[in-house]
Each structure stands twice: as C-alpha cells, then as structure tokens.
C-alpha cells in the first residue's frame, strides 16, 4: 500500500517517535545523534513534496540514518578544519621582517646588476632556462646553437650571478666539484 509522503510520513514519524528514537539510539550509539537525526527528518518532511512510499517506517528509518551520516561527515570536516586551523596558528611567522625585506631588496638589486653585466645571449639563455623553464634543446634550436654551447653559456651565466651575489654555485648536472681533502698535501 502506498502512503503519501508529506502528511502520512509525518504522522508515522510523530506517532512512532519513541520507537524510532530507541532504534536509532541503539544503531548510532548516541541518544543525541538519534534526536538530531529525527529532528532533521522532521524538517525535511515539512519541506518536501509528496511522493508515494511502500514502507513508511523503513523509509523514515533510512532517512534518519542518512541524516545522521550527513551530520557525522559534517562534524569530521569541521573538526579536521579546526585541526588545520590549530596547526596554522602553531606555525612560526616567517613573514619578512624589515631587516630581511631590506636584505631581499638589496639581493634583487645585485641580481639585476649581474644580469645587466651578462652578454645578451647569456642573459637570454639564463632567463629562458631558469625563469621560463624552457628545455635547453628548445633554447638551442631557437638560438641556432648546439645544446652543448647553451649548457656552457648557462653555466657561465649562473656562475657570474652567483659570484655577484656571493653565493655558492649549486651544480644541477654532471660531476660535482671535488672538495679539498684533508689527506692530500696542500
């Protein structure tokens, strides 16, 4: 037998509230979750359109379980967001203090000067490779150079900029420079 959803389902929920509450409490393990789920079902039934339902008690119980599941997912999301917020608040502030900001501006000026000192070809290769991330083979084809020549020019450009900034050159490819050994004679 089909029962119109709105009035009959609401009547079934209200008249069988205690039975639904007990069954949900056992299933969910929480009196409060059961009450919240039944409240959400009541609100949904008051807003909903009428549809035909074969088994109103089973339908209402499934609605309550789904409402409880939605609430638990929402709580998990909220608690995980709180955890993230707490972690963020515990992070040290690494924002640029005035001294570091001034040092960074000075370093940018030094880099700009070093770039101006480069030959146009070296500057182009450095910018294309490091700033735009273009492959060396692509740069070589555009400049009509061998890839080996592009590698050499790039190495000279990076070394020049590192020297002007008083920074060590970090070699990305090939053999690493030999470190001075304590065992070898000076």
Image (spheres, rainbow, N blue to C red):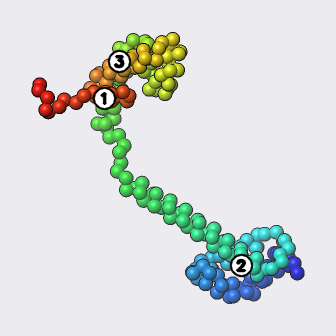
Q: Is residue 179 above or below residue 82?
A: above
Q: Which mark is residue 61?
A: 2
Compare residues 172 and 45 and report the one nearer the observer: 172
Q: Which mark is residue 21?
A: none
Q: Nearer the viewer, mark 1 or mark 2?
A: 1
Compare residues 23 and 113 and report the one nearer the observer: 23
Q: Quadrant of residue 161?
A: top left
Of labels 1 and 2, earlier in sequence is 2
Q: Disc 1 and disc 2: Cα gap in Å?
A: 69 Å
> Which part of the image, by quadrant, shows the N terminus?
bottom right
Answer with left or right where residue 13 lies relative to residue 91. right
Q: Disc 3 and disc 2: Cα gap in Å?
A: 74 Å
Q: Which mark is residue 156?
A: 3
Secondary element at tag 3: helix
Q: Residue at x 44, y 26 (%)?
A: 130
Q: Which residue is mark 1?
A: 176
């Amino acid at each position: 037998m089909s029962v119109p959803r709105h009035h009959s389902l609401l009547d079934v929920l209200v008249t069988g509230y205690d039975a639904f509450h007990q069954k949900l409490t056992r299933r969910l393990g929480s009196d409060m979750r059961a009450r919240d789920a039944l409240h959400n079902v009541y609100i949904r039934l008051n807003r909903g359109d009428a549809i035909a339902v074969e088994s109103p008690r089973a339908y209402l119980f499934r609605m309550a379980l789904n409402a409880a599941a939605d609430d638990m997912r929402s709580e998990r999301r909220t608690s995980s967001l709180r955890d993230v917020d707490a972690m963020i608040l515990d992070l040290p502030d690494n924002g640029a203090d005035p001294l570091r900001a001034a040092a960074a501006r000075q370093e940018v000026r030094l880099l700009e000067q070093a770039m101006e000192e480069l030959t146009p070809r070296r500057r182009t290769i450095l910018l294309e490779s490091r700033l735009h991330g273009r492959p060396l083979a692509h740069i070589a084809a555009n400049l009509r150079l061998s890839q080996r020549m592009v590698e050499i020019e790039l190495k000279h450009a990076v070394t020049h900029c590192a020297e002007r900034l008083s920074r060590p050159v970090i070699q990305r490819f090939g053999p690493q420079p030999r470190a001075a050994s304590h065992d070898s004679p000076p």
